[in-house]
Image (tube, helix red, strand yellow):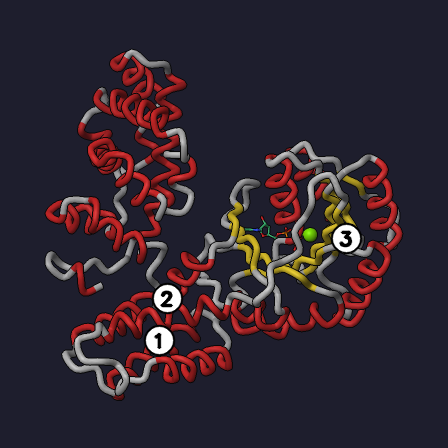
Amino acid sequence: LGGSISRAIQQMSNATIIDEKALNDCLNEITRALLQSDVQFKLVRDMQTNIKKIVNLDDLAAGHNKRKIIQQAIFNELCKMLDPGKPSFTLKKGKTSVVMFVGLQGSGKTTTCTKYAYYHQKKGWKPALVCADTFRAGAFDQLKQNATKAKIPFYGSYMESDPVKISVEGVERFKKENCDLIIVDTSGRHKQEVALFEEMRQVAEATKPDLVIFVMDSSIGQAAFDQAQAFKQSVAVGAVIVTKMDGHAKGGGALSAVAATKSPVIFIGTGEHMDEFEVFDVKPFVSRLLGMGDWSGFMDKIQEVVPMDQQPELLQKLSEGNFTLRIMYEQFQNLLKMGPIGQIQVFSMLPGFSSELMPKGREKESQAKIKRYMTMMDSMTNEELDSSNPKLMNESRIMRIARGSGRSVRDVMEMLEEYKRLAKIWSKMKGLKIPKKGEMSAL
Ligand code: GDP
Ligand code: MG
């Protein structure tokens, strides 16, 4: 699917003359792919119309890079569709905000509530969780478990069946305890939908949330628009969180949710764990939607900093999905050679990459860490370096590496954790079509 958009653009790139037909063919191809990515039909059609308005082939002076202009226009148009024009409500530290989560059952509300609380707790907030889902058996237990794990205070009841009563009690209690972020988790389904929306309306009326967040599963497909709209009609949805972006769905429903709620996407969920939660970033999201992965910008940047003759081989390996320890080692070598500007340029392109491996202002420390990792890797066998099987690294191997490099077992484990983390990120590269040598600039 992603391939088909890249292919469409690539095909157009190969056409020597870009005429009306070439543009239409390309747009049709992209339309098909966007529909498959769950972007709503109407939105795709609007985009197509807009692109045609922007890209006036006759007006483009000869010599301009028309392909780049068209590609950029598509990209920009999709970015614009994700921007409702106004930012979401901003929480203020030290001032109590009530945030209510709504969405269908299974969309990931309870999980996302905890992630949201945990995210803010790490930034110095004092969050609390209230379970107003009295509909589903076990809902309170689930929230309690999550909250306990994250050491976040919670409120709920096994006995009380009135969600309005519980949410009001919970909110009042945490206001008294001076929590500055009170999160209300709600139920997702009822015997009748009407009853669910009525319940949401009542909970909202009683708790007066500063922000209502609509939680949407990225895999719901074309249903996204109607679902988001239905919630927006009963409560004042002010932001969207798209979950399960770690799965196969490209998340085109997010465009629908933004259109239906006129609210921005603020976070995405990328896994079941508490910290698999990312601030929403329009550009990588659109790249992914267009099947460019998070790699379009990266590909541009990598051309600038990685020696040209080394690129195709590395990218080829990555597109085959083999991120081995040896590749990591080679990347570390490159990284240390490049000097600070190059390092930041490349790695800031990669989501979740720069922030942890090479945080701004801590380049010296990071370099020391990378060198330490490399020392340990010097004690690894070829088999270990070339394997992409995580099970290979058993206890005795880890101990041998620690001994060989004069580091602790814990250091080796840390290095392997880092490898796993990077492997997860780089695995997104798998399946990406890599241009052959000399074709790089056509991308
Ligand atoms: P709720 O019914 O809306 O409260 O949804 P839950 O929070 O109970 O989540 C439903 C299921 O989706 C659970 O198994 C979660 O672990 C899972 N889930 C939630 N968010 C994500 C995510 O971002 N990625 C993945 N892979 N699973 C998720
Ligand atoms: Mg729930």
Amino acid found under the numbered disc labelled 1: Ile
Q: Is residue 84 above or below residue 426?
A: below
Say the numbered circle drawn on residue 290: 2
Mark 1 or mark 2: name the one nearer the start of the chain: 1
Viewer-nearest residue: 342 or 315: 342
Residue 34 occupies which quadrant of the picture? Answer: bottom left
Percent coordinates x, y for residue 259 in the rendering: 57, 72
Which residue is located at x 33 percent, y 42 percent?
347
Please say if the residues under marks 2 and 3 sit with CB atoms less than 8 Å apart.
Answer: no
Say the numbered circle drawn on residue 133: 3
Which residue is located at x 46 percent, y 52 percent?
246
**Nearest to viewer (mark 2 / mark 3):** 2
Which residue is located at x 30 percent, y 52 percent?
298
Q: Could you tell me which quadrant the C terminus lies in? A: bottom left
Amino acid found under the numbered disc labelled 3: Asp
Mark 1 or mark 3: name the one nearer the start of the chain: 1
Please say if the residues under marks 1 and 2 sit with CB atoms less than 8 Å apart.
Answer: yes
> Could you say whether the residue bearing mark 3 is in a helix, strand or loop?
loop
Which residue is located at x 39 percent, y 29 percent?
362
Percent coordinates x, y for residue 194 in the rendering: 78, 72
